[in-house]
Image (tube, rainbow, N blue to C red):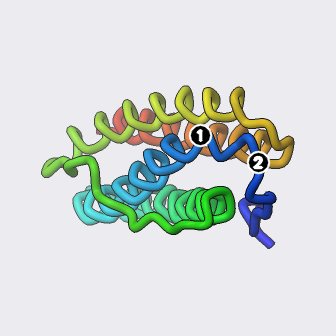
Amino acid sequence: MSPYGFYYRPAASPDTALAPDLIKSINGEYSAIICYEQLAKLAPTEDAKTRILEIRQDELKHLQFFSQVYTHLTSQTHKPVQTETCAKEYKSGLVASFKDEQETVDFYLGISDRAQDPYLKEQLRRIAMDEQNHAVWFLYLMNQQ
């Protein structure tokens, strides 16, 4: 099972207050998945393309986790919506991706601070660490230009 595996929490959880942030997370991960696929197509080298697609795979796991948590906390599903526009050029796409990943780290840590369930709190911190790692990779790719 992946580190972002199935999540269960009874419906009477105080973490249901996190639902709006979970929707934002779902939409953000979905947008990143779309944009990183496009960014990978613009990559100038096979190594850069591979790295971007690996980051995209992490975002797919995050999307699945946030969707499962949202469903278990609210007994509803949320259909993801693309909320960000993707850059049309490689360099601007790297810059936008770096900034987005950095902002997402802070956002996920904030959700983690408010989460009551210890498992959810820990998974949010792990995902925030993934996002920080992604930001470092995007910075590396920017410096390769």
As helix, strand or loop, the secondary structure at mark 1 comes to helix
As drawn, which residue projects farthest toward the bottom? 1
Q: Is residue 145 left or right of residue 104?
A: left
- Which of these two is toward me, 53 or 58? 58
The picture quadrant where one finds residue 65 is: bottom right
User: Mark 2 packing: few (<14 Cα in 10 Å), some, or many (20+)?
Assistant: some
Q: In this rendering, is residue 81 above or below 6? A: above
Point out residue 115 in the picture as x, y percentages from the top left corner. 73, 36
Q: Does dot 2 land on a helix, a strand or a loop? A: loop
Residue with the mark numbered 1: 133
- 42 sits left or right of 75 in the view: left
Q: Which residue lies furthest to the front in this view?
A: 12
- Residue, x 40% and y 59% (percent of image)? 30
> Circle 2 is placed at which residue position?
13
Residue nearest the viewer, comparing 54 with 19: 19
Number of the front mark, 1 or 2:
2
Instruction: Using the rendered image of the protein, determine whether residue 15 is visible from the camera's viewpoint.
Output: yes
Q: Position of residue 48 (x, y in %)?
A: 40, 55
Callout 2, which amino acid? Ser
Q: Position of residue 14 (x, y in %)?
A: 74, 41
Callout 1, which amino acid? Asn
Residue located at (46% from left, 50% from top): 23
Assess disc 1: are there few (<14), some (14-19) or many (≥20) residues with their C-alpha within 10 Å of its C-alpha: some
Quadrant where the C terminus sits is: top left
Sequence-wise, which precedes: disc 1 or disc 2? 2
Residue drawn at (72%, 38%) of the image: 125
Q: Is residue 53 above or below residue 142?
A: below
Distance Cα–Cα, label 1 vs label 2:
31 Å
| Disc number for residue 100 | none
